[in-house]
């Protein structure tokens, strides 16, 4: 006989589980403040909502993209009470493309948001403010990007090649006819690119395409299968029409279609030309890159004959201008190919006062042969995860001033704690607006040995 159910009901520990928030649900929200990435933050029924396209003080209708526990991600569909900060987004693809997420904010307010994020991280994590704030380094807010990856995907059901950029929080490709943030030479190439790719006999063999502009425009075609002679000829003709170099990448490293082709960029104030290959790290914003170097050199103030260490030196973007000023520069980089190209760049530019070495920059530096004479100054430009292992022993190298270029305020703040512990004072800091129309924050900080450090 079946056992009769009693009247008691048991719940999991922690109480009754709240029902989930389904994707696609529409919710009216009051936005209280902005997150570091520029999304609006709202609180509703015990959940925190991050709403793309919303601003503080606005009432919006938001559409749920995803929900995880008490956190809901959504996008704005209608604004009932617009903020004074809001502007009409200049790009018609802003609601679909995932690239430029803060176009609905004026450029002035974008800069203020980035400045606030940097200041908050330094104060929250390192309990410090710089003795002086530098004004943001800026470029035109559109037409600045000299490097871009174009997403390509063959849809077998539709028999169509999608060409464009990734949608926000999605692998979906948004097909677009133009991109306002690309420099003009790349805009012309990008406008014609979908047509030529879709005309190929085997468009499904294209993995992605990268665009570059410097001393010449260039198109890198990443292919997942061999291309026919006819498809290769079509791409050659397209690049010839655009006045662009053609590069190929299959299973091997990128290679130019025309042997000996050199891709590079200039640093005009220092009469320098730096060669690079697709895949090498190059700053995407030429105007901010030049202003960044000028500011770094002014803060570092290298003197002729002085030993300067450039960590995470890449192709020599900072090291070669420092050498041009007469300093003895040691550049250190983890990627062997970049070290080789930095050395070649120094030689081609007639600089024998810059030498480059490969090293694992997650390990202590003081035992390296190139470090045994010490340095008066250090410049470092690490990736997003920062340089904690590097700065832990940096005082053993003897620098009295350090310029730290950061692409992540959180790790800059973390490393600031360690530098202050070693007796370095935060003298100056400022924002580098390398990526207008996005919430991405880059910064520069100057540290000097001083009485307000926290040496123990």
Image: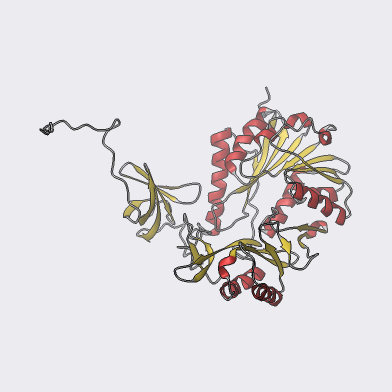
Q: Is residue 125 visible?
A: yes
Q: Residue at x 42, y 57 (%)?
A: 83
Quadrant (top left, top right, bottom left, bottom right) of the C terminus: top right
400 or 210: which is nearer to us? 210
Residue 122 point in image, percent of width and height = 58, 38
Residue 244 point in image, percent of width and height = 71, 71
Residue 300 point in image, percent of width and height = 76, 43
Q: Residue at x 65, y 47 (%)?
A: 134
Q: Quadrant of residue 412?
A: top right
Q: Residue at x 89, y 54 (%)?
A: 350
Residue 375 point in image, percent of width and height = 81, 35
The mark total stands at 0
Q: Residue furthest top?
A: 456
**Figure check: 214 above or below 196:** above
Q: Quadrant of residue 280?
A: bottom right
Q: Is residue 180 visible?
A: no
In the image, 213: left or right of 356? left
Display coloring: secondary structure
Quadrant (top left, top right, bottom left, bottom right) of the N terminus: top left
323 or 445: which is nearer to us? 323
189 or 181: which is nearer to us? 189
Q: Residue furthest front?
A: 1
Q: Quadrant of residue 361?
A: top right
In the image, 128: left or right of 380? left
């Amino acid at each position: 006989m079946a056992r009769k159910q009693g009247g008691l009901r048991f719940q999991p520990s922690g109480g009754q589980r709240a029902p989930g928030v389904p994707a696609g649900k529409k919710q009216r929200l009051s936005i209280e403040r902005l997150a570091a990435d520029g999304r609006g933050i709202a609180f509703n029924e015990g959940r925190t909502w991050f709403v793309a396209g919303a601003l503080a003080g606005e009432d919006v209708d938001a559409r749920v993209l995803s929900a995880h526990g008490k956190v809901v991600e959504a996008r704005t569909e209608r604004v009932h009470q617009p903020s004074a900060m809001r502007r009409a987004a200049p790009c018609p693809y802003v609601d679909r493309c995932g690239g430029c997420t803060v176009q609905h904010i004026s450029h002035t307010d974008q800069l203020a948001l980035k400045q606030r994020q940097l200041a908050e991280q330094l104060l929250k994590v390192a309990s410090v403010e710089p003795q002086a704030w530098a004004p943001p380094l800026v470029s035109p807010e559109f037409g600045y990007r000299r490097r871009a990856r174009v997403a390509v995907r063959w849809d077998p059901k539709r028999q169509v090649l999608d060409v464009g950029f990734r949608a926000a929080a999605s692998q979906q490709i948004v097909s677009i006819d133009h991109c306002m943030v690309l420099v003009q030479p790349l805009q012309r190439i990008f406008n014609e690119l979908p047509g030529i790719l879709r005309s190929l006999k085997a468009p499904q063999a294209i993995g992605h395409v990268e665009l570059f502009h410097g001393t010449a425009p260039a198109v890198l075609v990443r292919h997942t299968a061999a291309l026919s002679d006819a498809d290769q000829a079509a791409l050659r003709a397209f690049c010839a029409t655009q006045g662009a170099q053609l590069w190929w990448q299959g299973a091997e490293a990128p290679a130019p279609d025309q042997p000996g082709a050199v891709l590079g960029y200039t640093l005009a104030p220092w009469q320098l030309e730096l060669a690079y290959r697709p895949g090498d790290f190059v700053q995407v914003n030429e105007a901010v890159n030049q202003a960044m170097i000028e500011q770094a050199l002014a803060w570092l103030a290298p003197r002729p004959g002085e030993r300067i260490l450039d960590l995470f030196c890449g192709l020599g973007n900072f090291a070669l201008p420092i050498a041009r000023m007469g300093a003895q520069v040691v550049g250190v980089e983890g990627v062997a190919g970049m070290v080789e190209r930095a050395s070649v760049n120094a030689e081609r530019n007639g600089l024998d006062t810059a030498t480059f070495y490969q090293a694992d920059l997650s390990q202590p530096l003081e035992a390296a042969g190139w470090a045994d004479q010490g340095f008066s100054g250090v410049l470092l430009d690490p990736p997003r995860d920062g340089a904690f292992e590097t700065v832990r022993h940096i005082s053993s190298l003897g620098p009295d001033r350090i310029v730290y270029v950061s692409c992540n305020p959180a790790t800059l703040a973390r490393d600031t704690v360690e530098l202050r512990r070693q007796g370095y004072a935060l003298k100056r800091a400022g924002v580098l607006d390398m990526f207008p129309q996005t919430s991405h924050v880059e910064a520069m900080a100057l540290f000097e040995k001083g009485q307000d450090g926290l040496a123990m």
